[in-house]
Image (cartoon, rainbow, N blue to C red):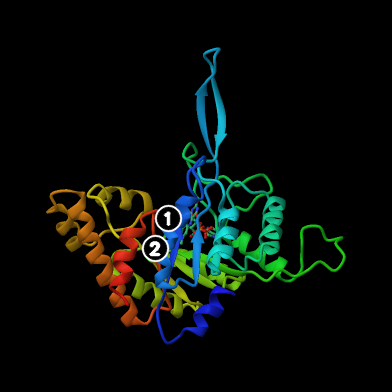
């Protein structure tokens, strides 16, 4: 079922959904069931699975020189989506990136997903590789998520790259896109970023999932501003609790967001990470309750592999 149909069917209550990461290469899929089994009591209608493109690393060869090799640390997004669908009978939403994909590879990946019965996709550009200063698309790949949305929307109309196909089937993907209540870090300003978001929606985006935020006012303003410029699709808030003192610095530097002064002050008084996690959980519960009051369609939790913390928050909402 499509995410937007699920949301439309449950307008009387706020749903919860989760984002999980594929296990590190070499680990078993049991790590996924360990996270999701305890979260099933909260009846998520869908679970997102992140995508991790390959990174380049330099390894010293026997001759002493360095070889540049490509390493993908967390493969398996598509397989995990299929496993989730069949084990839990819920929707799995793969994140599909522009980065690392040519248009043809994107088309083939979408065909695989269609065959697996995956109906929802979160269409993203992806970040620059660690060794690159800015995002570099593949030759014949997409430079912006907008172009990926356009390609999926064309396949939904039965338009493939190979125009000689006879009666090609129309795919039927529901397309989610990313939104940034505190602006994407590369955008010239907030308003321009909003206009880029509107282009993704006008091109076929069906719903928005936001970057994490810790100040609900940022989300409320973002929703108001989206509506002002004619973005009328569901806007699902993405949430993550602080779990370590060091995240006071690592979260702003990784995700380009601000942490509210009250939260920072409370975490700074914590003697250790266990105490910081408790503060983070409490903050996230309060945020979640206020968002439910506001009438959000769904609360989307970035689990970061920590089912216990996510469950501690969801338990307070039932
Ligand atoms: P875009 O929408 O393409 O925007 C990128 C930048 O370009 C923005 O500054 C925008 O304002 C600007 N822009 C957009 N269109 C145009 C245009 N036509 N002309 C000029 N400028 C333009 N990353 C992963 O690697 N894997 C994941 O699984 C993953 N999951 C995510 C899930 C969510 C909910 C979010 C919010 C982010 C996720 N990311 C993930 C991170 C994401 O890939 C990065 O934030 C990335 O830098 C931008 O992706 P985007 O899809 O928002 O890009």
Which of the numbered marks, if any, corresponds to residue 38? 2
Q: Where is residue 274 in the image (x, y as percent from the top left)?
A: 20, 52
Tell me the residue that label 1 is attached to: 34
Which residue is found at the position 28% from the left and 77% from the top? 290
Q: In which quarter of the image is residue 80?
A: bottom right
Q: Does the residue labelled 1 lie within 8 Å of ligand 1?
A: no
In this view, which residue lies farthest toward the bottom?
12
**Residue density around tag 2, few if under 14, some if 14–19, many if 20 or more, within 10 Å:** few
Q: Where is residue 236 in the image (x, y as percent from the top left)?
A: 44, 72
**Residue density around tag 1, few if under 14, some if 14–19, many if 20 or more, within 10 Å:** few
Residue 294 in sight: yes
How far apart are the two marked residues, 1 and 2, measured between alpha carbons?
7 Å
| In this picture, residue 184 sits left or right of residue 68 | left
Q: In which quarter of the image is residue 154?
A: bottom right
Observer-nearest of 32 and 278: 32
6 is higher (above) or lower (below) than 57:
below
Q: Position of residue 310 (x, y in %)?
A: 34, 62
Observer-nearest of 60 and 318: 318
Circle 2 — which element? helix
Q: Position of residue 54 (x, y in %)?
A: 55, 41
165 is higher (above) or lower (below) than 66:
below
Observer-nearest of 213 and 25: 25
Which of the numbered marks, if any, corresponds to residue 256? none
Name the image quarter holding the N terminus: bottom right
209 is higher (above) or lower (below) than 58:
below
Which residue is found at the position 30% from the left and 60% from the top? 241
Circle 1 — which element? helix
Contact between marks 1 and 2 (CB within 8 A): the answer is yes
């Amino acid at each position: 079922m499509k995410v937007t149909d699920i949301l439309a069917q449950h307008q009387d209550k706020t749903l919860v959904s989760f984002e999980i990461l594929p296990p590190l290469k070499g680990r078993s899929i049991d790590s996924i069931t360990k996270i999701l089994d305890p979260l099933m009591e909260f009846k998520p209608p869908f679970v997102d699975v992140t995508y991790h493109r390959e990174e380049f690393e330099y390894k010293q060869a026997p001759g002493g020189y360095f070889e540049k090799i490509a390493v993908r640390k967390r493969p398996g997004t598509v397989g995990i989506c299929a496993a989730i669908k069949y084990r839990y009978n819920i929707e799995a939403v793969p994140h599909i990136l522009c980065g690392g994909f040519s248009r043809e590879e994107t088309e083939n990946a979408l065909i695989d997903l269609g065959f697996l019965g995956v109906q929802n996709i979160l269409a993203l550009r992806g970040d620059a590789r660690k060794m690159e200063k800015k995002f570099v698309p593949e030759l014949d790949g997409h430079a912006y998520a907008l172009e990926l949305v356009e390609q999926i929307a064309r396949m939904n109309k039965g338009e493939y790259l190979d125009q000689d196909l006879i009666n090609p089937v129309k795919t039927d993907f529901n397309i989610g896109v990313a939104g940034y209540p505190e602006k994407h870090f590369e955008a010239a300003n907030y308003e321009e970023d909003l206009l880029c978001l509107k282009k993704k929606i006008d091109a076929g985006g069906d719903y928005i999932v936001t970057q994490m935020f810790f100040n609900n006012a940022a989300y409320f303003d973002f929703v108001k501003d989206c509506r002002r410029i004619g973005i009328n699709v569901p806007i699902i808030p993405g949430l993550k609790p602080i779990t370590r003192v060091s995240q006071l610095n690592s979260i702003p530097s990784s995700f380009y967001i601000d942490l509210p002064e009250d939260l920072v002050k409370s975490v700074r008084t914590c003697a250790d990470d266990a105490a910081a996690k408790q503060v983070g959980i409490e903050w996230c519960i309060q945020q979640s309750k206020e968002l439910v009051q506001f009438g959000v369609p769904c609360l989307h939790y970035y689990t970061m592999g920590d089912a216990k913390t996510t469950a501690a928050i969801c338990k307070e909402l039932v």
